Amino acid sequence: MDTGNPPLDALADATAAPGAARREDVPPRDRRWLALLGLVLLGVLVSQVGAEDLLARLRHLGWRAPLLAWPFALIAAIDGWAWSFTLPRGDGPRPGLPLLTMIRLAGESVNNLTPTAYLGGEPVKAMLLVDRGIDAAGGTVSVIVAKTALTVGQVLFVLLGIVAALERFGVLRSGTLPVALLCGLGALFTAWLVRIQQRAPIARAVGFGRRLGLHGPRFARLAATAPRVDGELRSFYSVRGRDFAASTFLHFAGWLAGTLEMKVFADLVGLSLGWRDAFVIESLSQPLSAGAAIVPGALGIREAGGVAIFRVLGLDESAGLAIWILRRLREALYSALGLAFLVARRR
């Protein structure tokens, strides 16, 4: 791993800082207690919904268990395609979709398995791009822009899910006006994110760090390369607005494909679930992981939130818990795949 690459050091500092602060605020012993608390919460959930009902749902899978993996393969491919729109242009090397998807899985596996607020895998993605011959600064900008597009798509997905939930409970008779208002809110949020990234965010971080008294060779490299990274980031939004829009649209499609995964999982555990309810469950469950980032892997919190959503919708809670446990296993499968790819590339 080329640890002397200044643009990647800049990205590593920018993305690792939240994780480092989190580790300092939550010592390893406390994280172990939080993980234990998550396990206890999971045990309480199993007790509440009934172990026999839960096992019956899981046994319903039978030989169809491998079918749990295919929806996320589609989601990963869509997200990889979305990322491809942010890569540097030109005649240089450009990873194909299968390789780009695997690089993204490697980064996301680090995001899922480390307490870095879902940012620790971003430098990994950039470094793997450099291994494929992509310019370090361009790869850094690509990762930042792709993360922005992913976030914008997720926010829009959650907002539309809130509208669908309000319609389901009869709070809204027509969602046309709320959808228009939320789309406007999403546009303002996007403009705000882009505006921040056009105002030299790396250089501002350097200035803030200096006021805090940060120093050292790595910080010096960050300060030296900040203008270059900020310049290319600003240029991307000025010149390649359509690529950013395409990436955002595809990432939104990836979030929508999560609805398909929810529907497939429900069918496999024997639950009759409509498409609207699947959309509502998938969209409202998105904030759970972010809100429970302090707990390693959001263990127990994600499952409790999922079961609560099923309860509010009047759906079978044992099916809800079974789905979230199976999603946990699917996440472990793809995280292992991403880590295996990362280890192979590093060797």
Image (cartoon, rainbow, N blue to C red):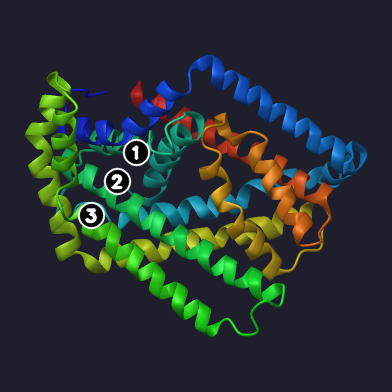
Which quadrant: the N terminus?
Answer: top left
Q: In the rendered structure, which disc, 2 or 3, sits on the residue that comes first in sequence?
A: 2
- Residue 117 in picture, x, y percent from top left: 43, 37
Q: Which mark is residue 122?
A: 1
The residue under label 1 is which amino acid type?
Glu
User: Residue extending furthest front?
Assistant: 211
- Position of 213 with respect to 285 (left or right) is left
**Spatial separation of the CA atoms under disc 3 and disc 1:** 19 Å
Kind of residue sitting beneath label 2: Val
Residue 53 lies, in percent from the top left, at 90, 43
Q: Compared to 344, does 50 lie above or below?
A: below
Residue at the (40%, 54%) spot, across then down: 151
Crowding around mark 3 (Cα neighbors within 10 Å: few <14, some 14 to 19, many 20+) is few
Please report contact status of discs 2 and 3: CB closer than 8 Å, yes or no.
Answer: no
Can residue 135 be seen in this snapshot?
A: no
Q: CB atoms at circles 1 and 2 under 8 Å apart?
A: yes
